[in-house]
Image (tube, rainbow, N blue to C red):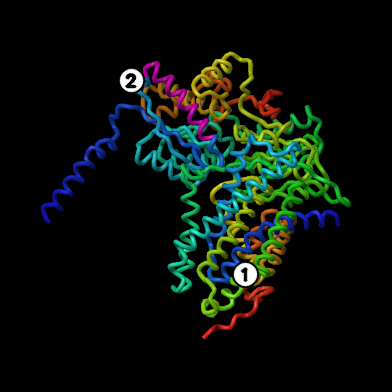
Amino acid sequence: MTYVLQQLLNGIQLGFVYALIALGYTMVYGIVRLINFAHGDVFMVGAFVGYFTLRALARVTLAGASWLNGILLFLLAMLAAMAACTLLNVTIERIAYKPLRNAPRIAALITAIGVSLFLEYFSSLKFVFGPNYITFPSPLPAQTWEVAGLRISAIQVLIAVVATLLLLGLNYIIRYTKIGKAMRATAFDRDAARLMGINVDLTISFTFGLGAALAGAGGVLYVSAYPRVHTFMGIIPGLKAFTAAVMGGIGSLPGAFVGALIMGVAEVTAKSLYSTMADGVAFLILILVLLVKPSGIFGRAEVEKV
Amino acid sequence: MRTIRVLSVLVIIATLLPLAGCAGGGGSKTLKIGVIAPMTGDVKTFGESTRNGVQMAVEEWNANGGLLGKQIEIVLGDDKNDAAEATAAATKLIQQDKVKFIVGSVASKCSIPISDVANKNKVVMISPTSTNPKVTVADGVLKPFVFRACFIDPPQGAAMAKFATENLGIKTAAVFYDNGNDYVKGLAEFFKASFEARGGKVTVYEAYAQTDTDFTALLTKVMAEPPDMLYIPDYYNMVNLVNQQARAAGFKGILAGGDGWDSSDLDFQAADGGYFTNHYAADDPRAEVQNWVARYKAKYGTVPDALATLGYDAANLLLNAIKTANSEDPVKVKDALAATAGFPTVSGTISFDENHNPINKDVVILQVKEGKFVHVATLKPE
């Protein structure tokens, strides 16, 4: 029993990170009906910015206690990653997607794949991030606690706390702020929103930025738990988060969160049963969802607008 | 318009002509040695060290008047630690640069495909550090043009099993291995077989893929019945990934691995206290070793790792064979190389057996301790 719970904990750890990426996919889809395939690569950029920030601050001490110092440095790295990713994604939207807003959706989709490949290969260049694999320095000491027979590691606590706070923040922005209201209105009906005086371009930019900030934070959390950074690291987590968003019902925020948790738990379960099966299971889920309930768990069947 | 077009064609031909002359190669002024190593990607320190080692050897030969009256030139190919890239690099060196001798590659998963290309094209190849048996022999058939300067994985896996059971008193071990990597898979198998033959118990024996990053599920499986040792015979970047997560998951036992751990990019903090098998120890008091370490340090400013040392040894073996054959003909060089007997190198005295593997090379056990590798034992192969 403890074993099952322990594995469940591992699954939730992974699921929380997937959730941070999946929300960006689903928000962008909700507002411009675009599957932003470059999202996984924005996540990768976040991980790199986090790494470079931590490296630059390697000799800086912010607090006496080593664990507190570690957390503060980690938060700084995460904020830097969030800021950089926001800027990057807003720029991508302005340059690559905005001119295509009224073009057929397939054109925008292909552009997104192009942006994804650009980010991967451009950042592999020697003067950008470089083509090498880097080990991410662990921000926290390798500490574990025994709680009712379960081993909980410091990194698990960090992921759970940070991800929960970010998700609560996101929930607050979308439900209780003016820009959040504008986002919901634009997602509901872009033209009507524009007629009501909403600055649609700004709202769309904000959505891309918000999604990227979550992905950036997700990137730093991911490499803190699984400490390997390289320029193609965003592909697989990106695809899995996309799968999670589809499973939850693309366009639905609670759907993305629940889908990501299911995804994380399913992957870990598969791995604990037969270790090389994990990726297969993840994509089998995608196929099954598309066959059985294409609109996803929380999705509504969409009525084609005439 | 027409004249401009004709003129431009003439200009293009004029610029290409001298290039064509170069590619002809036959009576070239330098002796070209191809080096294939992972200069970028997940194991780039291996590539850098190997190139440095080969470079040292070549510079020393050149300073002594070169070989066959020619200066030696290195042509470098990057395999990115990827089998397809390795094949492409080898093909380019052989077809385009007309190289007849190759030192490389580092990883067995690259050296195995390269060895087939080299053997088919009658190009002599010597791998400095590829330890998988399949590099020189496929299905019981020797590849006559392919050699290596290192021991092979069966004695390497057995050495760690022996050291673990006899010196450390290890009774249980868990093993993780990359299913798609010949070296890792082979070493894991050889360790397991030898460890079990010595009465040890392998509690968990699990595969992963090279793209995997999350080891928490496997580690939870391991921790259900914590073993004395966790054996991860992969390259340093994967080892870092597993070691950090193993410590975070509360594993308190001994971490261990193979020669893939030997890198300045190993996470020394996570791997602290761990043991790994290797080709040589930099703190070996033998004069050849200390002399080599001093020369390397003077040139590159760091202590040479096994990759640099074996790169140097492999290049020396090859260049010596060319000298003995007194010819650039790969067939003669291959025969001279196969006949090598009692040739002194930094990592030991080398004679080749019928499978083109060095006979009886020692396996060294190093411990990761406070940011350094410390020599703890030398095992004779059995």
Q: In which quarter of the image is residue A277?
A: bottom right
Residue B161: give x, y in percent of width and height: 73, 33
Q: Name the residue under label 1.
A: A178
Q: Can residue B342 be seen in this view?
A: no
Inspect the magenta stretch and tell me whether residue A191 lies in it.
Answer: no
Is residue A19 depicted above or below A33 in this figure? above
> Which label is found at residue A26?
none
Q: Can residue A134 be seen in this view?
A: yes
Label 2 crowd bin: few (<14), some (14–19), many (20+), radius 10 Å: few
Residue A231: give x, y in percent of width and height: 54, 49
Q: Mark 2 lies on which chain?
A: B
Is residue B118 found left or right of A161 in the rendered image?
left
| 1 and 2 marks in contact (CB < 8 Å) | no
Query: Which mark is in front, 1 or 2?
Result: 1
Is residue A28 depicted above or below B142 in this figure? below
Q: What stretch of residues is rendered in magenta?
A: B46-65
Image mark count: 2
Q: Name the residue under label 2.
A: B69
- The amino acid marked with disc number 1 is Lys
Q: Quadrant of residue B188?
A: top right
The residue at 52%/55% (across/down) is: A88
Q: Which chain carries label 1?
A: A
- Seen as rendered, the residue at the extreme left is B3
Inspect the magenta stretch and tell me whether residue B48 lies in it.
Answer: yes
The residues tagged by marks 1 and 2 sit, at their Cα atoms, a distance apart of 81 Å
